[in-house]
Image (cartoon, rainbow, N blue to C red):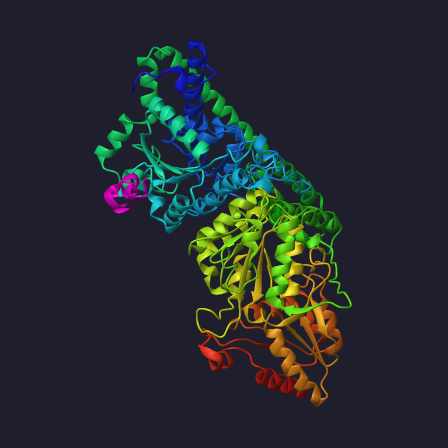
Amino acid sequence: MENFAASAISGDMLSYEGFRTEVLNDYRIAFESREVSFLGRKEVLTGKAKFGIFGDGKEIAQVALAKFFQAGDFRSGYYRDQTWMFASGIATMQQFFAQLYADPDSLHEPFSSGRQMVSHFVTANTDENGNWKDLTAQKNVAADMAPTASQMPRSIGLALASKLFRNTQVLKPLTHLSNNGNEICICTIGDASTSEGHFWETINAAGVMQVPLAVFVWDDGYGISVSKEYQTTKGSISAALKGFQKKPDTNGLDIYTVKGWDYAGMCEIFEGGLNKVRETHVPAVFHVEELTQPQGHSTSGSHERYKTPERLQWEQEWDCLKKMREWIIENSIATNEELNELENTSKQIVLQHRNTAWREYLQPIKEQSAKAVELIQSAMVNDMDAYNQLQDAAKQLQSNTEPLRKDVLKALFAAVNTTKNYPGNEDITSYYNELKYLNTALYNSYTYSNNAKSASRVKEVKAQYADDASIQNGYEILNKYFDALFTNNPHIVAFGEDVGMIGDVNQAFAGLQLKHGSNRIFDTGIRELTIIGQGIGLALRGLRPIAEIQYLDYLVYGLQPLTDDAATIQYRTKGLQSCPLIVRTRGHRLEGIWHSGSPMGMIINSLRGMYVCVPRNMVQAAGMYNTLLRSNDAGLIIESLNGYRLKEKLPSNLLEFTVPMGIPEIIKQGSDITIVSYGSTLRIIMDAVKRIEKENISCEVIDVQTLLPFDVEHSIVNSLKKTSRIIFIDEDVPGGAAAYMFNIVMEEQQGYRWLDAPPKTITAKAHRPAYGSDGDYFSKPNAEEIFETVIKLMAE
């Protein structure tokens, strides 16, 4: 390493002693982080923890990076960043071990309350009431997730927010969300994961958009067991990216290469490079090479199986801790004896944090176990077999010095059944139910927002109409709605393919970019994955993005960040982080396989944690936008593509009326049969119902309005109590959304108790819809099929 001037580390260190103190502090943090990794691996191998994945070998690069991570910035990282989080003061070693043990106590493990594996961090962006925090006053972390490269798409949005805050006048007053766009997004990724399409789509989008995104590639030479020669063209991601290099007359990004063991060199390059990203909003890639991985990829295997002896020897020689230690001694910053003392002290500190974390994790379980043993042992039974069973269960639980919560529940469950006819059963049953309730709160809560900003808590406000309300096309209703929305709410931005200049392919945004500006309504490339990621990142920073996916079929391209990020964020952070993204799309067309899809089963089963809204017309859609915008929840609104030119009345309270989430609407009263559906299918149903009622059959037609959540007040069962017959109809494949609705109403809500005839479903065919009007007719439910099914059902 070269000699290192104090100014390269910190501009406010005017003395050599200050410089020395900071260097030694950095080494201490790095050394302690390495010890955390070593001890963490042992905890897994001894069975105290389930799985471990650590950041050993990356420590020096991360302490260097932490110096330039400022309040207001966002980290979008992955599971190797523990040292960065320790150095930034966001995580402690004790919290790290608590997460390793899956401690569900949020006071011990404040990042996921035991719901995510170790090395997954987060900072809250809203308070306990759902109000946005001052994000400029803290260093921010977007909630980590494990799928490789999944941190990339949202990074675009986290960086884009700074560009919008800097260049959009209506956003200037939002000083709690941004300091004039001076914040950067720092994204970390392993070298092998740059092979994922997520990486390339994000890099391309960043280069086009020119946003302050800094991507750090930790390169230790391997992706699990596969060396980078088999991962990356030219064996180097920085070499492969040369065509993206920004030049004076082009867009693109800056590319830096550094050695991961060179503390001084990294501090110098990181400082200059990140300052440039911050000031100019030109994105950058920092390729951090020659890193090592002393313990291999994870606790699930040994790297000696796939690394050559020569490679293993090289890793020992060029380990970043070893190289920094040598540099400290060579530059007379500290002696070998001083470093030995620092290291010995650090080892003891790490050990103390591990022991405390384990003790705090185990203590409440031991207390539950002791109480369960006492209750079981004291139960009075007059049957010797039952008595012996109870004593054996108590003894087994008592002898378990490191019980799990499930061990306590299993012992209590056995005791409940053994004592069901004896005194003492009531106390055991009561404690068993108490622990079940407690553990449900620990492990099964926060699928959705749980505070005042929950979309489910938004009260219904009916649409109002003036006596002379105009009749307009559906797209014109939305156009007027979006115009009013952008006029009155500066947080709103909308984007997608063809959304900006032409106002989207169905004209709901026609003319609005010109009126409200290209920083608020704008086009994107054809890149659905990062359109969704862009929306997630903007939402995490307190804006209210409407991200458009042009057709429902293409949602598949953006499904991964929706299912792994937006839909799980409340759960995996236990309500700490909110992501109020609205995804706007449309379906139900007559143009065949790629524009007529209705993959609702896929959507509702992969997006638990999001609201899925299925409006039958554009007025209803506007009300759903209003509801979601009053909340901090993420939602998907699927407009009916073949409804944009149908006539509707224009409400007089466009921005005020709301559609309740999870509350179906009866759109036609009836007494003989209940028909349940949503969206465009309802128009076909209503056509069939006109003919059915000529046969003296009274149909009650219910629009479910939202599939997630679904009929939370059991109003469909209330209808079934009146009619005793029911049909579920939709355009999804057999076993899709119709089966989902069937399951909830028949099984969960016990609707079967009110049936006088078998319940029915009518769905699309199992194949994709064929092209054209005839293809649509024979691929999806039609009025004649509905008519025939109802007549047959009424005859049973």
- Residue at 30% x, 42% y: name it: 241
As drawn, the residue found furthest toward the right would be: 467
Is residue 200 or residue 606 the one in the foreground? 200
Magenta run includes residue 236: yes
Relative to 460, say whether 181 is above or below. Answer: above
Residue 689 image position (x, y, % from top left):
66, 82
Q: Is residue 142 visible?
A: no
- Residue at 31% x, 16% y: name it: 3
Relative to 681, say whether 207 is above or below. Answer: above
As drawn, the residue found furthest toward the left would be: 310
- Residue at 39% x, 40% y: name it: 189
Magenta run includes residue 782: no
Q: Hey, which quadrant is residue 376 in on the image? A: top right
Tell me: 61 left or right of 101.
left
Residue 67 image position (x, y, % from top left):
45, 25
Quadrant holding the N terminus: top left
Q: Which residues are magenta?
A: 229-245
Tell me: 134 left or right of 192.
right
Relative to 695, say whether 620 is above or below. Answer: above
Relative to 280, say whether 429 is above or below. Answer: below
